[in-house]
Image (cartoon, rainbow, N blue to C red):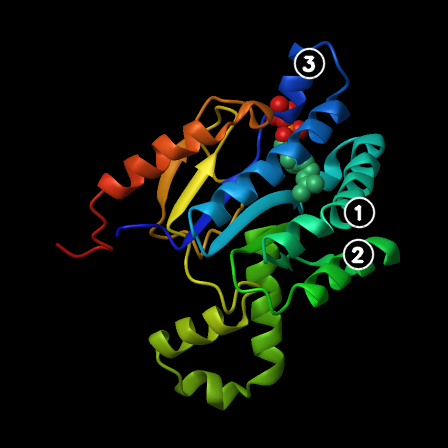
Amino acid sequence: MNMPKHIAMIMDGNGRWAKAQGKKRTQGHKEGAKIVRDVTQWCANKHIPYLTLYAFSTENWKRPKIEVDFLMNLLEKYLHNEQPMYMKNHIRFRAIGDISIFSTTLKNAILELEHITQNHTNLTQILALNYGSHDEIARTFIKLANTLSPTHLAALSTSEVIDMINANLDTATLPDVDMLIRTGGEKRISNFLLWQASYAELFFTSTLWPNLRTQELDSMLEDFMQRKRRFGGL
Ligand code: FPP
């Protein structure tokens, strides 16, 4: 079966959803968190091994402090409150991105959920937190430059360098993205998994994230399975 191994999602449209309901933008994020749970369970039911969700980008710090603080709080609450979902469904949790600048309590919530779910063998759900592809690639570059001598680097072939980059990105042990879905109507990738989604099939929907339902995911999955992927070959 031509099923995707790794689905990535850009969860856009929370603010517009809230505005349309006459609510504050932050209420859109709260509603959005419920959809995170639904989408995660949908992936687990479909036996999709990896799901990566863009929860907070390196650019999201530019938002008003009140919204950033709300998102940080929401995330921390989510990581505590949803523990039973990860345990019951045997879902593994992982974070990618630079979490070093988060508050100690948020960092601990992330590390704790990663720890208690590390042996789970169903879906791995990955949250991209303070994540941006440029930042990830730059951190990988610094790591490699600090560990390899200039002579060693100069002797490497480009394919060896590609393997080394793959092995040192935040996504090191994950397969490349097969299917990239963006809700909210914009048709762009916004600095998300640029390296890993090189051959991903792209899906853009105008549905706002809080309005996303599993029926729409079912049709996208059907569409994905019809697509002929050639990875640059014939
Ligand atoms: C983009 O919508 C969404 C975000 C920047 C945050 C995504 C967060 C969630 C879906 C909820 C929290 C997540 C977890 C894992 C608990 P937007 O605010 O840019 O929407 P707009 O384009 O309509 O303004």
Q: CA distance from mark 1 to mark 3?
A: 24 Å
Closer to the camera in the image, 213 or 133: 213
Q: Quadrant of the C terminus?
A: bottom left
Label at residue 19: 3
Q: Quick check: can you spot residue 131?
A: no
Mark positioned earlier in the residue sequence (1 or 2) = 1
Q: Quarter of the picture for ligand 1?
A: top right
Check disc 1 and give the amino acid type: Glu
Quadrant housing residue 21: top right
Q: Quick check: can you spot residue 165?
A: yes
Residue 72 pos. (x, y %): 79, 43
**CB atoms of marks 1 and 3 within 8 Å:** no
The residue that label 2 is drawn on is 109
Closer to the camera in the image, 176 or 44: 44
* Residue visible at 17% across and 57% down in the picture: 233
The residue that label 1 is drawn on is 76
Residue 127 pos. (x, y %): 62, 51
Quadrant housing residue 142: bottom right
Q: Residue furthest left?
A: 234
Q: Is mark 3 within 8 Å of ligand 1?
A: yes
**CB atoms of marks 3 and 2 within 8 Å:** no
Q: Badge 1 local density, few (<14 within 10 Å), some, or many (20+)?
A: some
Could you tell whether 131 is left or right of 190 in the image?
A: right
Check disc 3 and give the amino acid type: Lys
Q: Nearer the viewer, mark 3 or mark 2?
A: 2
